[in-house]
Image: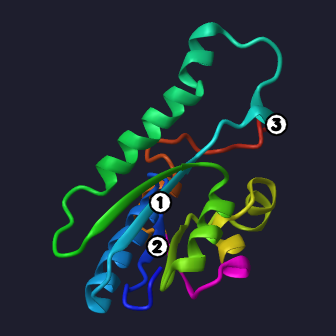
């Protein structure tokens, strides 16, 4: 990158509500800075989840070309409708944590979403946002999933039957 070229705001997207909120925030920040937005989506095939025989139909759905096509479609959809800022769509095969921290080396700012899974789920799945905060080469902004989305996802079923300890004697 030349000295005269401005550094982009980099944002990681995965199709989640938190990632969409992060993209909106990144676009507004890039408008203020007068720079472009590099929207990065990382995909990879997780061989660790395949145990035993897998039907051919499922293998076709999780084949690298199918995963890449789905990621491209999602990336194109999430970046539609933004005006007044240059958006560069980047699709990369790899672990999102590694891809985003590598992209942070040439970035003005890295923006990621946080689903807020909590300690236990975060320890099992790993947290992209936490990894980026600790390993990025530029400042990192973490955007939480919008409150309305969290409430809708975690709301109890309206017509759920009351819980009882069993037959009362």
Up/down of 86 relative to 120, above or below: below
User: Which contiguous range is marked in magenta?
Assistant: 133-144
The answer to whether residue 2 is seen in the rendering is: yes
Residue 30: % across, % down: 32, 82
Please, what secondary structure does the residue beneath circle 1 have? strand
**In the foreground, 146 or 136:** 136
Please, what secondary structure does the residue beneath circle 2 have? strand
Look at the numbered discs 2 and 1 and tell me whether their residues touch, using CB distance below 8 Å: yes
Look at the numbered discs 3 and 1 and tell me whether their residues touch, using CB distance below 8 Å: no
The scheme the figure's colours follow is rainbow
Label whose residue precedes the other's in the sequence (2 or 1): 2
Residue 145: % across, % down: 48, 68
Counting the numbered discs, the total is 3
| Relative horizontal placement of residue 108, taking residue 117 as reference (left or right) | left
User: Circle 3 is placed at which residue position?
Assistant: 169
Residue 137: % across, % down: 65, 83
Q: Residues within 10 Å of mark 1 (few under 14, many from 20)?
A: many
Look at the numbered discs 2 and 3 and tell me whether their residues touch, using CB distance below 8 Å: no
Of the residues tagged 2 and 3, which is closer to the observer?
2
User: Circle 1 is placed at which residue position?
Assistant: 40
Distance, label 3 to label 1, CA atoms, is 60 Å
User: Circle 2 is placed at which residue position?
Assistant: 10
Residue 14 among magenta residues:
no
Label whose residue precedes the other's in the sequence (2 or 3): 2
| Relative horizontal placement of residue 167, taking residue 140 as reference (left or right) | right
Please, what secondary structure does the residue beneath circle 3 have? loop
Q: Residues within 10 Å of mark 3 (few under 14, many from 20)?
A: few
């Amino acid at each position: 990158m030349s000295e005269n070229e401005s550094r982009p705001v980099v944002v990681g997207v995965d199709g989640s509500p938190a990632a969409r909120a992060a993209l909106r925030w990144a676009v507004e920040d890039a408008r203020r800075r007068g720079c472009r937005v590099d929207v990065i989506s990382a995909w990879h095939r997780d061989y660790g989840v395949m145990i035993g025989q897998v039907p051919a139909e499922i293998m076709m759905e999780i084949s690298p070309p199918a995963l890449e096509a789905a990621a491209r479609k999602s990336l194109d959809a999430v970046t539609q409708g933004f005006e007044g800022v240059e958006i560069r769509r980047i699709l990369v095969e790899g672990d999102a944590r590694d891809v985003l921290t590598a992209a942070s080396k040439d970035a003005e700012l890295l923006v990621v979403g946080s689903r807020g899974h909590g300690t236990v789920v975060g320890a099992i799945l790993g947290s992209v946002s936490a990894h980026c905060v600790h390993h990025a080469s530029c400042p990192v902004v973490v955007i939480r999933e919008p409150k309305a989305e969290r409430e809708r996802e975690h709301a109890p079923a309206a017509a759920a039957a009351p819980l009882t300890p069993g037959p009362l004697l």
